[in-house]
Image (cartoon, helix red, strand yellow):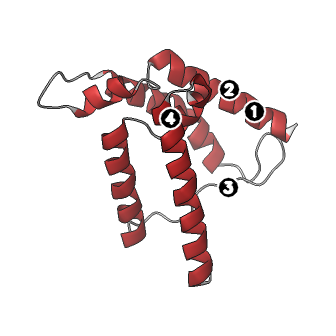
Amino acid sequence: MLKLTAFMAGLLFGFGLLLSGMTNPSKVLAFLDLAGAWDPSLALVMLGAIGTAILPLTWARQRRYSLLGRPMQLPAKRELDRRLIGGALVFGIGWGIAGICPGPAVAILLTGHWQAIVFTLAMLAGMMLFTALEKRRGL
């Protein structure tokens, strides 16, 4: 049941990305082009996502267990630190260069777009590098 629920949530997320046009790198890059042909639609998608998430997150914070009986796993750490800021900068730079982030990359991976394939390979390499560095730090 847990794997089916995760699969269905991923499908719904991917469908939302496709429906909103956020799998199109040029649409994302147009949002980031403040001095050119700026496209505000990504901001509207973000606002819609925040609005949709407010009630479930409020509900989740008040519970110890999920609807499927698993312990709630919400982030406990709330302060900004060097690692969070560094990771956000790396993410933002990559997003600005490619116009793709992890969700859309996975959603369009099977379309054969070479950018999505290169991005996904780079993302996996980054994840492996992070894991190796964390092991080295002893975490």
From the image, tell me which residue sits under label 1.
7
**Is disc 1 in contact with disc 2, using a CB cutoff of under 8 Å?**
yes
* Marks 1, 4: nearer the viewer: 4
Tell me: residue 135, above or below residue 117: below
Under tag 1, what secondary structure? Answer: helix
Tell me: residue 43, above or below residue 134: above
- Residue at the spot 43% in from the left edge and 36% down from the top edge: 100
Task: Please state the horizontal and vertical placement of residue 45, each as a whole percent of the image.
Answer: 41, 25
Q: Nearer the viewer, residue 115 or 128?
A: 115
Spatial distance from mark 1 to mark 4, Cα to Cα? Answer: 21 Å
Q: Quick one: label 3, few (<14), some, or many (20+) residues within 10 Å?
A: few
What's under tag 3, amino acid-wise?
Gln
Q: Nearer the viewer, residue 11 or 80?
A: 11
Under tag 3, what secondary structure? Answer: loop
Mark before the other along the chain sequence, 1 or 3: 1
State which quarter of the image contains the N terminus: top right
Residue 136: image quadrant is bottom right
From the image, tell me which residue sits under label 4.
116
Q: Nearer the viewer, residue 91 or 44?
A: 91
